[in-house]
Image: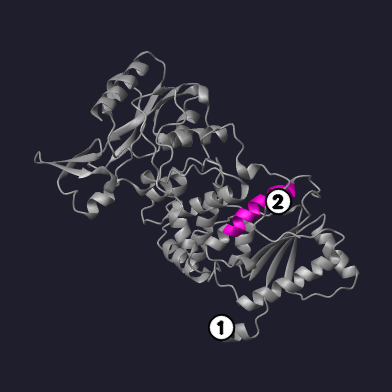
Amino acid sequence: MKNLQDTIREIAAQSLARGEVELVIGWEKGDLWWQSYPAFIEEEKEADRLIWDPLCVPNLSRYLLQELSEMDEKKIALFVKGCDALAFNQLLQDNRTVRERVVLYGIPCDGLVDPSKLEREGLDRDLQEVERDGEELVLKAAAGEEKRVPAKDYLYDKCLTCRYPNPVAYDQMLGETVPVEPEERFTGVRKLEELDYEDRFSYWAEQFSRCIRCFACRNVCPACSCIKCVFDLQEPRWLGKATEPSENAFYHIIRAYHVAGRCVDCGECSRVCPVDIPLQELNRKIILDINELYGEYDAGVDPEQEAPLITYKTDDPAAFTES
Amino acid sequence: MSVAREEHNFEPLIVAFCCNWCSYAGGDLAGTSRMSYPPNARVIRVPCSSRVSPNFILRAFQRGADGVLVAGCHPGDCHYITGNYHARRRLSILRRFLGFMGVEPERFEVHWISASEGGKFAEVMTEMPEKIRALGPNRKLRDAR
């Protein structure tokens, strides 16, 4: 991993020095071991802040929305993992970014570490640094101790089902492509579908009851790119301010439905949720239905392909009785 | 009103979004043809079935509807050429999604009713309340305040 991190710093420094770009977006280390935050680098000498470790999970493409609008004609360099690249393509398809103004450096990603899985087993004690070494994670503690654990046990669930770990859009690829071995991603959806309607409703009512309406799931989503969001409207006010069960359900149903056919299944919504609502399952249910009814479609893979819910066929099937 | 009493006298409340160009006229035809059907539905006239946003449907459930009906022109007959083709995809996804959320699919129906199908309009308006009566009052998604 160190090699890739050096390459990232080198590229950032060079492209800023040559004036090819005005801004580089990458990741930097926070104060704690699990914090790998988005970093916005404008000076060549700052490039050493950039890092690459198995905790660099924030999807950077979404930040183009604010940065591009603030920067007029300037160019931005962006490091993209597989999911970031899908997100970039989706923004491109939604006309929310400009391909010519962005330089993409692709990072093949072999899965990122879920800090909560390490915490669950108490492996986070005195932890300073996490490194990836092949199929293993190297956990470095404060006292210089090292512990090796199998990486696969501690990756995000969304990474285990990832079908595009290698970026689908890039100007330059950094590193070797990684093998694609996804687990079945609709298992969770199918399990919920085995419940009857009452149990499904109580399941979701319980999940949504924890919602504090922080809107993190909306704010992080690369498909939620509207300039004016329906949830912020005062007139008509579709979403009330109270965190009341029906308002919460309204919010989550509409949020998932608004990204229907555009969700790239990056799983950021579930990751950022402070109360662990399995939001990705909502999006995946819609993806599954679109695939079943209107043909397989992977949002973000080909920005030229028409999204399923903005087009139609005259002989489409329907999920209701037509007569 | 106590729950028991509400269930005893339960009359399903249905919000029906009807396309101006066909289903609404179909309702008119049912009326001028002197067909009778139960008065459970509150009809809201919309310019096209594709005008019906999921916000409308959820809001209806929030404010006390036991069922929601969207009625539009038959595919191919849209006044705006393609509106109902889009609606067919969107509402199909929404209907399955509401089912996933635990709302019985009988509570959200889509029907194609043309301006000449007064009989079908009356039929749908008769059948849907019966199905919902069997399910009982809807409390899911209902705003309890």
Q: Quadrant of the N terminus of chain A?
A: top left
Visible in this render: residue A169? yes
In this rendering, the count of numbered labels is 2
Above or below A273: residue B103: below
Side of A194 where B12 appears, left or right: right
The chain carrying label 1 is: B
Mark 2 and mark 1: Cα distance apart in space = 36 Å
Q: Is residue A93 left or right of residue A64?
A: right
Residue B50's mark? 2
Q: Residue furthest right?
A: B33
- Rate crowding at label 2 as few (under 14), some (14 to 19) or many (20 or more) other CA atoms within 10 Å: many
Q: Which residue is mark 1?
A: B3
| Residue A99: numbered disc | none
**Left or right: A2 as drawn, with respect to B29:** left
Q: Nearer the viewer, residue B39 or A114?
A: A114
* Residue A220 horizontal/vertical position (percent): 43, 43
Q: Inspect the image, locate mark 1, and give the three-letter code of the amino acid beneath it.
A: Val
